[in-house]
Image: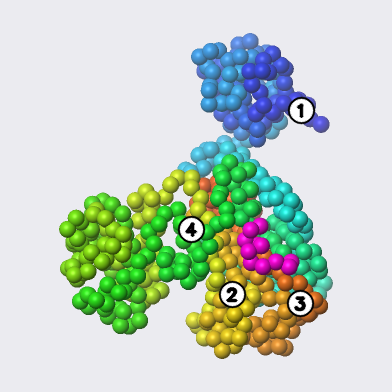
Amino acid sequence: MFELKRTANCGQLGIEDMGRTVTLNGWVHRIRNHGGIYFINLRDRYGNVQLVVDEQASSEVRAIGEKLKMEFCIAVRGTVRPRPQNMVNKDMQSGAIELAPTKLKVLNSCPPLPFVLDGEDEANENLRLQYRYLDLRTQGMQQRLKLRHECTWALRKYLNECAFWEIETPTLIRSTPEGARDYLVPSRINPGHFYALPQSPQLYKQILMAGGIDRYYQLARCYRDEDARGDRQPEFTQVDLEMSFVGRDDVLTVAEGMMARIFKEILDIKIPIPFKRLSWQETMENYGTDKPDLRFGLEFTDFSPFVASSNFSMFKKVLHSGGTVKAILAPGAAMSYSRKKIAETEEVAKSQGAEGLAWMRVSNEGLEGGVSKFFTGQASKIITELEAEAGDLILIIGADREITLRSLCEIRNRVGSNLGLIEANSYSFCWIIDFPLFEKNPESDTWKATHHIFSKPQDKFLDRIEDNPGEVIGDLYDLVLNGNEIASGSVRIHEVELQKRVLKLLGFPEAQARKRFGFLLDALSYGAPPHAGIAIGFDRLMMIIAQKNTIREVIAFPKNTQGISPMDRSPSTIDENQLTELYLSSMPH
Ligand code: ASP
């Protein structure tokens, strides 16, 4: 063991340790030279302590103290003493004391830093990722990793109490279509054969149910080879779980309990359960998205009836061609939304494909400005329907249904935050249920699963699978938090014949289905129990809890937005002989 091994950490010392001689190990967080007196802020994972190398220090200690630089890793022995009254720092847990070193040793030196630690908002992200070992020393990263650890600990305890077993499933698996592209791993000992990295442990968890495990969970690493856009990571973590002999509501209850537990234990916030449940259909109609931010209202109102009885020809045309007209009421925004601001809001609508944004103000006299002249006859009806008051602003979009929903959704989010309708530190959960099970592949005119191919149609739709797939509602559910989808799951198909029917519709006739999913079909046919499950996007949940806006801030070693790890420079090219060993050859690109 090295000399001067710590006997305490920097976070535990306080006034009660006065007179104690301790040894500390850590990093030089900050160093100030005040006319030959060195104030060294020593940091470890647990906190900070001030060391003072003054005239009374031995010449040996002074000689070392003078050479210290930021982020040197050091060991120090000294006696805890009170700080002079005028130097007490109330913001620091050890702010009333300091350590006068009697021994000081440099355990490792450090070159000048590439960026200022603890200035994470200013530092270039790629630089932070390149020197992640330095970035990880910052208070922000340490707090977030601690938070993440505490969350995993809380949910493990919770799931254990609920009789779940934590079981690992393989990460080298058979390539099966699950929605995204697989990452492939060549098998050297089986030339020409490949493993895939799991997009999720979906099939394995279902097979665990067939194996009588009853309740499984795992903090599962998932890999999806998708284009690097938005906040995606090629690998991410799910809290994956599956339950036997249950229906939808049993899964929702377990997930609600888990959220309530995490928020209570980690943030000391009581989350009311059960969460609101909204059908996909009504959510799309009212919010234009299947992940509505319910921290504020601003529900859509169907404006089509008013348009139909008006002479507003532009919107009437929209209705005649099968489009939709919807409105939101921005409370009290009549004055704060100047023409300029309305024009900016219109740009938001245009960026989503709408041709424009119609608006009118509500006054004591009725409706004013914008398109109000087309609706004068219906003013009081509109005001009643929208529950509007003088000073409110009505924003209306008329377009193709999808465009209307998309643009008004975007506007709703903007207006919600512009008007300050989102309360700080508020968390609003809801379930979206009753999703359509299948959707048309626009390019190929074939059907695909909206969630995945193992989800069960609701019983009343079983006879429509082949004839009217678009009408089939599945037992699917998403958990939404503050406008983010944080979990998704379904009741699974557990009967082999039904699974075959669904596979057939999705382009896997019997022979193909056997080839690709034979093992699952067999497992189902050997008495698999009814089962259902869910997977929580753990990185995203942590991002919200940590109040950050990218999941990279809650992952120790994330890839950057180009899917590259600037620290170890992966992905990298590999040697020709590595390729040869794997029976691969590289193509020019
Ligand atoms: N495996 C699914 C997914 O990753 C989640 C689930 O259905 O449990 O989306």
* Residue on which the image places disc 4: 483
> Which residue type does callout 4 highlight?
Gly
Report, in whole angstroms, how far the alpha carbon at label 4 lies from the one at label 1: 49 Å
Q: Which residues are magenta?
A: 244-254
**Which residue is located at x 38 percent, y 75 percent?**
401
Mark nearest the camera among 4 and 1 is 4
Q: Are marks 3 and 4 in contact (CB under 8 Å)?
A: no
Q: Secondary structure at mark 2?
A: loop
Report, in whole angstroms, how far the alpha carbon at label 1 lies from the one at label 2: 60 Å
* Residue on which the image places disc 1: 5
Q: Are marks 1 and 2 in contact (CB under 8 Å)?
A: no
- The numbered disc on residue 524 is 3
> Which residue type does callout 3 highlight?
Leu
* Residue on which the image places disc 2: 474
Instruction: Indicate the quadrant where residue 406 lies.
Output: bottom left
Answer whether residue 585 is magenta in the image: no
Q: Is residue 565 in sight in this rendering?
A: no
